[in-house]
Amino acid sequence: MDDLDRAARALLRLPPSLGPVRLVAVDGHAGSGKSTLARRLAAALGGAPVLRLDDLATHEELFAWTGRLREQVLEPLERGRAARYRPYDWTLRGFGPGRELPPAPVVLVEGVGAGRRALRPHLAWLLWMERPAGASWARGRHRDGPEQAEFWDGWEVAETRHFAEDPSRPFADTLVREREKGYDWLPGPGVTAGADQIITHRDGVLAVDRVP
């Protein structure tokens, strides 16, 4: 069992946070590795659905997607129904065909701002990718190439403003740090210790502390 398997097992022991769903956020700076972690964690969870916040944002509304998230995703999941949303096409600059998100035991939501204050009350756990902003942005720019340089210039300003007004890291339950193979899972600023706590952080691994 590797660290992702242990993390998946731990997350499944959490109580539901949104109707029947354990909504788990993966937040961090753009380019920090959120999408890769979410994809690997989803696989360890047996194919858990992943909502990418890039599918709800637009060129004009980089962070003004809270209303769409609430109406199209949170409200249906809370009622135990499949969510249905229309992913934004960043090339065609418009919303595409509808996509369903089932009310699975764990649903991952990944993207910059996944731990924002409007979403936190619905979260079972908040993961933060522990990579500095500058290093994350440099990685993202390298990934996207020089043709996206102008977009990144504007993005860095918008992200800095967002986290200044609505930070996520101070509320993170777990800080996730990439290593050569796997991840280190460290207690975040938002984690609280107690006899009834289900998830703990031991030797850089997210683990089940108590199994009923």
Image: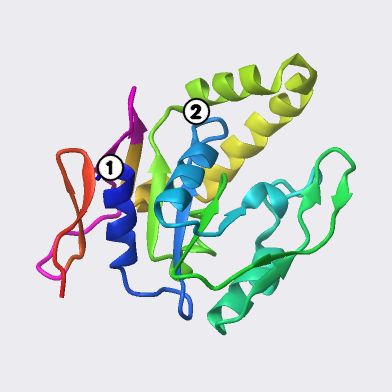
Taking 181 as reference, is 176 above or below it?
A: below
> Which amino acid, by three-letter code, is at mark 1?
Asp
The quarter holding residue 70 reads: bottom right
Identify residue for label 1: 3
Local secondary structure at mark 1: helix
Local secondary structure at mark 2: helix
92 sits left or right of 174 in the view: right
Quarter in which the N terminus is drawn: top left
Tell me what residue is drawn at x 76 percent, y 49 percent.
61
Labels 1, 2: front one: 1
> Which amino acid, by three-letter code, is at mark 2?
Ala
206 sits left or right of 38 in the view: left
Identify residue for label 2: 133
Q: Residue furthest bottom?
A: 79
Tell me what residue is drawn at x 71 percent, y 17 percent.
145
Badge 2 crowding class, 10 Å Cα cut-off, few under 14, some 14 to 19, many 20 or more, is some
Taking 141 as reference, is 78 above or below it?
A: below
Residue 10, image x, y percentages:
27, 59
Q: CA distance from mark 1 to mark 2?
A: 25 Å
Give the overall secondary structure of the magenta segment: loop
Front one among 94 and 188: 94
The total number of labels drawn is 2
Front one among 47 and 54: 47
Quarter in which the C terminus is drawn: bottom left
Residue 178 on the magenta span? yes
Residue 122, image x, y percentages:
47, 70
Residue 114, image x, y percentages:
53, 53
The quarter holding residue 66 reads: bottom right
Badge 1 crowding class, 10 Å Cα cut-off, few under 14, some 14 to 19, many 20 or more, is some
Taking 71 as reference, is 175 above or below it?
A: above
Residue 73 on the magenta span? no
Start-end of magenta stretch: 177-196
